[in-house]
Image: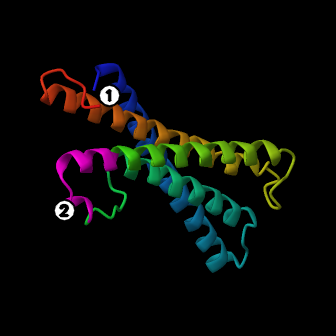
Amino acid sequence: MKNGQNSGMDKLRRFNENALIVGIIATIIVITLQVISRTFFSKSFSWVEEVGRALFVYFIFGGAALAYKQGLFISADFISNFLPKKVNAILSLIMDLITVIFFIVVAILGYNLFTASKGQLTPALEVEIRWIYLAFPIFFAQMAYFAVMNIISRFRSKSDAEGGRSWL
């Protein structure tokens, strides 16, 4: 992969990792505050559950983007292990393209949800719920980007292995 593409992916990965770390620390602080408040003062904050839920949404999709980038998604590869290399390469490309299309569709639908929910407020914080829904287009677009970069990387590595010829 070219240095520009690799550094872009690395910057995005590092941003996600750092954002997830900050989010986890914030969640621990907020939940601890709620536990202390309930235990010692018999009082709870209504906003804690909303903040926890919003952070959870971002954890799930941010973590999914990182997991996809690192190749940690589960795949059923038992069939591809028995196929000839050429057929396996074509099948892998088809699956990667389907994955890219899926990620793009969900990112677009997530963006539509983001724009359609303008003005809807969360009950406790009275923050627009769209900012929670923004996780969908952000992280699914990232996964689509990672998937496209994986396809490009596969083409380049295959091309390099065959002395500069493209494999398609």
- Which amino acid is tagged 2? Phe
Q: How is the image coloured?
A: rainbow
Q: Where residue 5 sits in the image (x, y, percent)? A: 36, 25
Q: Where residue 18 sits in the image (x, y, percent)? A: 43, 42
Left or right: 23 in relation to 76: right
> Residue at 20% across / 23% down in the picture?
165
Q: Which mark is residue 6?
A: 1
Left or right: 148 in relation to 76: right
Q: Which mark sits nearer the N-terminus, 2 or 1?
A: 1
Q: Secondary structure at mark 2?
A: helix
Asked if labels 1 and 2 touch by Cβ distance under 8 angstroms, the answer is no
Foreground pick, 121 / 163: 163
> Residue at 78% across / 41% down in the picture?
115
Q: Which mark is residue 82?
A: 2
Q: Where residue 37 sits in the image (x, y, percent)? A: 65, 71
- Which amino acid is tagged 1? Asn
Quadrant of residue 43 within the rendered picture: bottom right
Left or right: 46 in relation to 8: right
Residue 70 seen in the figure: no
Q: Which residues are magenta?
A: 79-92
